Structures are given as C-alpha cells and as structure tokens.
Image (tube, grey):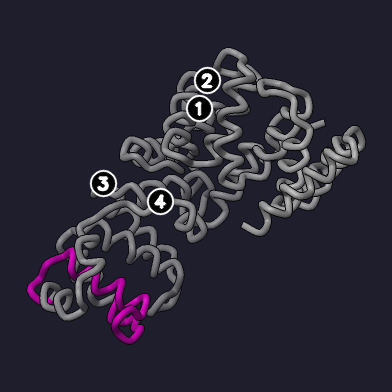
Amino acid sequence: MITSASNSKLTQIGRLLGLTLLLTIASRAQPNGASKYETSPIEVIKSEAQRGVAAAQVALAERYRAGQGIAKDNGAALKWLRLAAAQSEASAEYKLGLMAEAGDGQAANLAEALKWYTLSAKHGYPDAQFILGAMYYKGHGVSADDREAARWFRMAADGGHNWAQFSLATMFEDGRGVEKSSVQAVKFYRKAAEAGLDAAESMLGQLYYLGRGVPQDYLEAARWYGRAADKGHSGSQAVLGAMYSRGQGVPQDVIRAYVLLSSAASTAEEAADKASYAASRDQVAAGMSAVQLSEARRLLAQKVRK
C-alpha cells in the first residue's frame, strides 16, 4: 500500500549530490550579464568581448563551447572565461570550475575546479555556492563537513537557488550540520515548492500527508502532490493515485487513480518502484468495472499520445 512518496528525500538528495557535474543539470541557471547577449550576432559579441566587457566574454565563451554561430573550440572558451574571471566575473569563475571538473579543453582537475567554485561562491554566485555545498556534503574534493555544506547551501538558498533550498530543508529535517528544526525544514521546502521544484512539491505533500512539521491535511497534501505529479514526478503520481483510489483528500475516482498509477509505473526509475506502482494499479483495476477500465485505458492512451 502506497502511503507517501516512495522517492524519499534521502534517495533524492543522495542522487542529487552524487557527482557535482550532475548537480549542474539539476540546478537552475542563474541570471547574469551574459544573458543580454543571448540573441546578439556573434560579431557584436566578439567586438564587446575584445573591448573587455566581461559579460560579453562569458557569452563568447559559451558560443565557443556550444559551437553556436562559430566553430566549437573549448580552448577558446577557456581563454575568454579566464579573461572574464580576471575581472572577478562570478559566472565565468563558475564555468571555469565546470570545465576543469569535466576536463573540457584541459585535463580534468578537481582541485582546480574547487578553486574556481570557491571564488565564484565567494563572489555570490548561487550555482557555485550550491555546488560547493554539495562537495562538502558528499566529501567530493574536500573533507566532508556538514556545517560547511549547510553554510553554502544557505547562501545559495537565500539567493533563490531552488535545489539549495531543498537540500537545506533536508538538513534541517535531519539535524545534519544545523540544529534540527521542522519549522525551518518546512520553510525551505515551501520556498522551493512555490518556485516549482517538483521534488520539493512532493516533499511538502508528504509533510502534509503525514502531519510532520505541519498540521495533517490530506487536501493540502493532494494539492502539492498534484503539482509534482503534473510535472511527471512518479512518486507523487503514485501517492496521488492511491489517494484518488481511497477518496483521501480528493473525491474518490478509480479511473483517475488507474491513470496516475499507470503513469507512475511507466516513468519510475527504480525497478522496485515500477513493480510497486504497477501492483497498486492492478489492485485498483481489480475493483473496476469493464466500462471504467476501458475509459481509464482510453485516457491513458490519450495522455501517451500527447
């Protein structure tokens, strides 16, 4: 029986903090001056970069990295990022860290990556603060240090970084590197959830479902699970499906329950989760009429076509 999101916070954050390069995929891009050059012709960007405009130098480096409007050249990207970093451009320092860790245009060098991440983080760049927090959390390139991890996560969270807010919330929930506080955990989960991070929406749904740190409220739990489910979060789809099958916080609707549980089973990453969600779907199906089952399968096929 599914009663809360099977994608536990520990599983989520464990995957999140496994490799800092993977973290860059999860972390939202922070705005910087280079964004003004996103649609500029390459000749304009080159001219501005040659005049020493740091944001243009970062933009030109990104064009070289992507091979956009110019031949792909990681060496040239490094050159322009270093020129921007010499002006203390935090986004350039961050990108130099990414390239050093990935070995783009150079031999991979974690110590060099750490140097650039730290400079960028100290200059207030939330993505770098988040990755630095992750490195301390995991002991990746540095000695593991929960207090340092929480410190950098908080800086990034205060800068609006949603994954940092989520990560800090888990630390408050577990009392890891900070004093345990359900109030603070809910606060940071809510910040990330209200910004649309599906993992945080799911966790907030779970907190309301269990009454942990907030009053138990199945209606509110269904609302947050629903937001995450709409984004394809399989654990939330499974829990919301189970809630619809029981009429818990939502009107009982076995057809919708079947569709949600089927979606969860098809998108879950872990084999155990797939099997669990499929079993729950089949349990719901066993109590459905032929007409209901036909309609559920029609809706599911319609959803797949979209």
Which secondary structure dominates the residues rendered in magenta? helix
Name the residue tied to disc 3.
124
Q: Which amino acid does label 3 sit on?
A: Gly
Residues packed near mark 4 inside 10 Å, few (<14), some (14 to 19) or many (20 plus): some
Rendered position, 219 above or below 112: above
Horizontally, is 198 left or right of 194 in the view?
Answer: right
Q: Contact (CB < 8 A) between labels 2 and 4?
A: no
Residue at x 7% of width, y 74% of height:
51
Residue 101 in sight here: yes
Looking at the image, tell me whether mark 1 or mark 4 is earlier in sequence order. 4
- As measured in the structure, the alpha-carbon distance from the residue carrying label 2 to the one carrying label 4 is 25 Å
Q: Contact (CB < 8 A) between labels 1 and 4?
A: no
Residues packed near mark 1 inside 10 Å, few (<14), some (14 to 19) or many (20 plus): many
Q: Contact (CB < 8 A) between labels 4 and 3?
A: no
Name the residue tied to disc 1.
172
- As measured in the structure, the alpha-carbon distance from the residue carrying label 1 to the one carrying label 3 is 23 Å
What stretch of residues is rendered in magenta? 50-77
Q: Can you give x and y, in whole percent of width and height, for residue 116 in the image? A: 32, 60
Looking at the image, tell me whether mark 2 or mark 4 is earlier in sequence order. 4
Per the image, label 3 sits on a secondary structure element best described as loop
Per the image, label 4 sits on a secondary structure element best described as loop
Q: Which amino acid does label 4 sit on?
A: Arg
Name the residue tied to disc 4.
28
- Place residue 201 in its image quadrant: top right
Residue 60 drawn in magenta: yes
Q: Nearer the viewer, residue 148 or 173?
A: 173
- As measured in the structure, the alpha-carbon distance from the residue carrying label 1 to the one carrying label 2 is 7 Å
Horizontally, is 158 left or right of 273 in the view?
Answer: left
Q: Can you give x and y, in whole percent of width and height, for residue 69 in the image? A: 29, 81
Residue 182, disc:
2
